[in-house]
Amino acid sequence: MKRLSAEELLALNKYILDPEDKSIVLNKEICRGCSAKPCTFACPAGLYTVKDGEIGFDHAGCLECGTCRVICLHPEAINWQYPRGGFGISYRYG
Ligand code: SF4
Ligand code: SF4
């Protein structure tokens, strides 16, 4: 049996994007003062980015793992909730 890579396993998941997604909302003013920005390397889906010193976030592909919520250096910077019912990720392989 072929052992799948993490990327191949993630590609099996189904994701329904909520066009009005407000599940993870950042306070960018607080993020601006966060020098380490651990979310940019801890998010397993790579959804946090930095461009010109400004934090960026894309909901599409969120694994709902909660890592960013736990690792955030300024917890008040993240308003974290699960997506609305019917939206977000459906795991197909464990
Ligand atoms: S760790 Fe928290 S405060 Fe720092 S950039 Fe990421 S979301 Fe913003
Ligand atoms: S919940 Fe997990 S996958 Fe979603 S943005 Fe946070 S760290 Fe990334």
Image: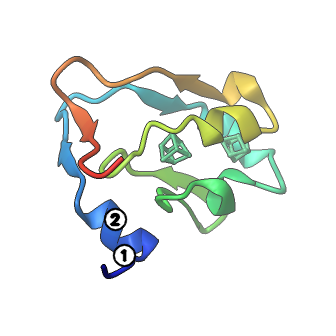
Q: In this view, does 5 lie to the left or right of 43?
A: left
Q: Quadrant of ligand 1?
A: top right
Residue 77 position by quadrant: top right
List x then y, in percent, for residue 13: 24, 53
Q: Which class describes the residues within 10 Å of circle 1: few (<14), some (14-19), or many (20+)?
A: few
| Crowd class of label 2 (few under 14; some 14 to 19; many from 20; radius 10 Å) | some
Q: Which residue is drawn at 58% across and 54% down?
A: 43
Whole-Å distance between the Cαs marked 2 and 1? 6 Å
What amino acid type is highlighted by mark number 1? Answer: Leu
| Label 2 SS | helix
* Foreground pick, 31 / 63: 63
x, y percentage for residue 69? 64, 32
For ligand 2, tell me if the residue under mark 1 lies within 8 Å: no
Seen at 66% across and 56% down, the residue is 42
Q: Give the label on residue 4, or none.
A: 1
Q: Horizontal placement of 48 versus 7: left or right? A: right
Could you tell me which residue is drawn at 15 percent across and 24 percent down? 86
The front one of 5 and 14 is 5
The residue shown at (79%, 32%) is: 74
Horizontal arrangement in the rendering, residue 42 relative to residue 18 (left or right): right
User: In the displayed structure, does residue 2 sit left or right of residue 77?
Assistant: left
Task: Give the quadrant of residue 40.
Answer: bottom right
- First in residue order: circle 2 vs circle 1: 1
The amino acid type of the residue labelled 2 equals: Leu
Q: Position of residue 29 (x, y in %)?
A: 67, 36
Image location of residue 61, percent across then percent down: 33, 52
Name the residue that disc number 2 marks: 9
Residue 35 vertical position relative to residue 20 in the rendered view, above or below: below
The answer to whether marks 2 and 1 mark residues whose Cβ atoms lie closer than 8 Å is: yes
Q: What element carries label 1?
A: loop
Check the image and report above or below for 70 versus 47: above
